[in-house]
Amino acid sequence: AAEAPRRAAAVTDARARLEADHAKRSSLARAIMAEKDDKLEALARKAAALENELASGGHAHRKFVEIAEKQARRDGALATEAEASRLATSRLRQAIRQRDNEMADLASRLLAAERGLVEATRDTGRDAVNLEYVKNLVVQYLSLRPGSSEHASLVPVLA
């Protein structure tokens, strides 16, 4: 009976730690995703601005051609970085989904443990009442004179 509250406290502590860990990781993942999305948008705007600048000047001048070649190399690097950001974002979302599933599983296990604890507590109370009843029957049986009708009527109850 004394172990049930201790188990309940341990389960509650474990749940609180898991929820805090999940909240921390989820917040971190969202922050990283927002940062990557902002960076991706800024890179896309910059690439569009540079393409417009190049398109408006024409290819007649050698300097513009050189700028275009440099920009093409930068765009390639930016595209690679953008793809890496998308991949990282996808992995973080998958990790968040996995954590959410783990949390749901742990929450269901916690609920089952809490129900078991309540049932065990309830059963302990019933057992104490049953033992008191049996004790009273035995005391009454022993206090009666052997062979009496009352003594004989308690034999089937005790059996």
Image (cartoon, rainbow, N blue to C red):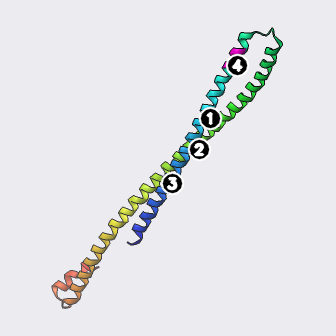
Q: Amino acid at mark 1?
A: Lys
Badge 4 is on which residue?
50
In-front residue for pair 109/38: 38
Image quadrant occupied by the N terminus: bottom left
77 horizontally vs 19: left or right: right
Q: Amino acid at mark 3?
A: Leu
Above or below, 4 relative to 134 = above
Q: Amino acid at mark 4?
A: Leu
Of badges 4 and 2, the one in the foreground is: 4
In-front residue for pair 36/114: 36
Badge 3 is on which residue?
18
- Of the image marks 1 and 4, the number of the one nearer the N terminus: 1
CA distance separating discs 3 and 2: 15 Å
Tags 4 and 2 touching, CB below 8 Å: no
Of badges 1 and 2, the one in the foreground is: 1
* Residue shown at the point (50%, 52%) measured from the top left: 20
Tags 3 and 2 touching, CB below 8 Å: no
Considering the numbered disc 4 on the image, is that residue within a helix, a strand or a loop? helix
Residue 100 at x, y percent in the picture: 52, 45
- Of the image marks 1 and 2, the number of the one nearer the N terminus: 1
Q: Residues within 10 Å of mark 2 (few under 14, many from 20)?
A: some
* Residue shown at the point (56%, 43%) measured from the top left: 96
Above or below, 95 relative to 21 = above
Q: Amino acid at mark 2?
A: Ala
Badge 2 is on which residue?
95
Residue 28 at x, y percent in the picture: 57, 44
Q: Range of the magenta residues? A: 49-53
